[in-house]
Image (cartoon, helix red, strand yellow):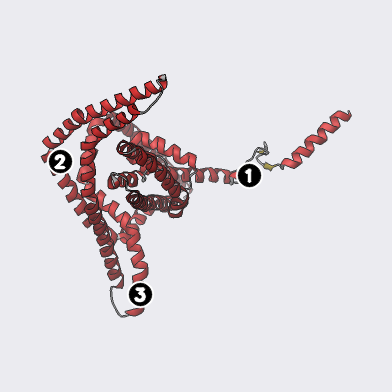
Amino acid sequence: MTEKRQTESGEKREKIGIRERLGRGMAVFLVVAACILFYFALLRVAQLSDAVRAVFSAAKPIVYGLAIAYLLNPVVKSVDERLFPFLEKKCPRLKKKQQISRGVGIFLSVLLLLVVIVALLNMMIPELYSSIRDMILTVPTQMNAFLQRISSMDMQSTPLEQLLTNLMEEAAEFIQNWMRTDLMARVNDVMSGLTEGVINILTEFLNFIIGIIVSVYVLYSKEKFCRQSRKLIYAVFRPSTANMILHLTIKSNEIFGGFIIGKIIDSAIIGVLCFIGLSILDMPYTMLVSVIVGVTNVIPFFGPYIGAIPSAVLILLTDPRMGIYFIIFILALQQFDGNVLGPKILGDSTGLSAFWVLFSILIAGGLFGVPGMILGVPAFAVIYYIAGMLVDHMLRKKKLPTAASYYDEYSYVSDDGKFIHADKNILKEKGEKKDADSSTE
């Protein structure tokens, strides 16, 4: 009986050893296969990028739908929070109250989106067309008139004034030549490719319409999609890892949602205020400048300057006095946005200081252009939050405080791992006492 048990235990150990060897061999095989696949992927980066572009082009309606659903979700959620309790109170016997509330919310949000788009197009397109046409027709004349004003001034013939005059003349000549040659050539290229452009516009418009339809389905079944995603995450990952992934997903949604939606609302308000202010001041190119200022304001930090500089140049060419008024007005408007309106709408949605905002805009903008400048701040805010969590976790494992305020110049960690928080006054008294003792000796 004992020999039989020994034989069975030996067979079990042999099987376990075989399984361990097979597991190690499979792990080595997978690592080698992954390295080979990565090597061949590097050799075919161009083909892979073309395949990614093709997939993205085919999935554009879905991308549009997800983006539209993400932007409309606050409206749908707000309607649900008010309409569903009202239906439960007033119509307790009504079935499918949740579906009715959700349907009303989706209908109102899509209707609001379409009304805003149609209203903006009706207001902006005629004004933009007339502003751009006037700019192309009148800028060369305005440049000449501006130079004549400078040359007619009674100025002393100093080297600096001569240099400024030469620079203005060269700039005027360059702009006029560009508008007569390069700009007209670009217009001709656009006109020659008008058919392709119209097809592209119609394709994008069709993708947008399909995206609205996709967004309706996404908004109607968003809870189901969320439950399926959570189910998949818990099935693939360990409970602790799954909980961390879900926590980071919720936090990322808070950061991106708060920043993007808040920035869109903030930029729309700034564009409207700019239009009202320029209309009161009777500025030229009112609608064109307001659209430029409102759109570029979506870009944090640099956006106001990106929109204000070309707008100021346009207005300065028409009327230098109006240009100065515009610069003063836009500075006041941006101060209002940066100190009052922006913090009121955005709050502390990213949790980043001014330095990290500037850092994320420069890095993301340099890598991904304008989309990187817009989305770089919330993306870096998520990375910053994850890094903070990891640092706090490692400090807790070492039983050290996590607040940054503890780590001043007078605090340190001893060799045995204990945190020593020294007081400045106590250290000063000890130093004075030590000096007194040494002088006594």
Q: Residue at the top extreme?
A: 159
Q: Give the crowd class for mark 3: few <14, some 14-19, many >=20 residues within 10 Å.
A: some
Q: Which is in the foreground here, disc 1 or disc 2?
A: 2
On residue 16, which mark appears? Answer: none
Q: Which is in the foreground here, disc 2 or disc 3?
A: 2
Question: How far is disc 1 from disc 3 in space, using C-alphas?
Answer: 51 Å
User: In the image, what residue occupies the spot 22% across and 35% down?
Assistant: 50
Instruction: For the residues labelled 1 and 3, say whether their Cβ atoms are less than 8 Å apart.
Output: no
Where on the picture, by quarter, is residue 30? Answer: top left
Label 2 belongs to which residue? 197
Question: How far is disc 1 from disc 2 in space, using C-alphas?
Answer: 60 Å
On residue 406, which mark appears? Answer: 1
Look at label 1 and name its amino acid: Tyr
The number of numbered discs placed on residues in the rendered structure image is 3
Picture coordinates of residue 337, whole percent (x, y): 43, 49
User: In the image, what residue occupies the spot 26% across and 49% down?
Assistant: 63
Compare marks 1 and 3 and give the one earlier in the sequence: 3
**SS label for mark 3:** helix
Picture coordinates of residue 172, whole percent (x, y): 28, 28
204, 61: nearer the viewer = 204
Q: Give the crowd class for mark 1: few <14, some 14-19, many >=20 residues within 10 Å.
A: some
Compare marks 2 and 3 and give the one earlier in the sequence: 3
Q: Which is in the foreground here, disc 1 or disc 3?
A: 3
Compare marks 1 and 2 and give the one earlier in the sequence: 2
Q: Is residue 95 left or right of residue 333?
A: left
On residue 86, which mark appears? Answer: 3
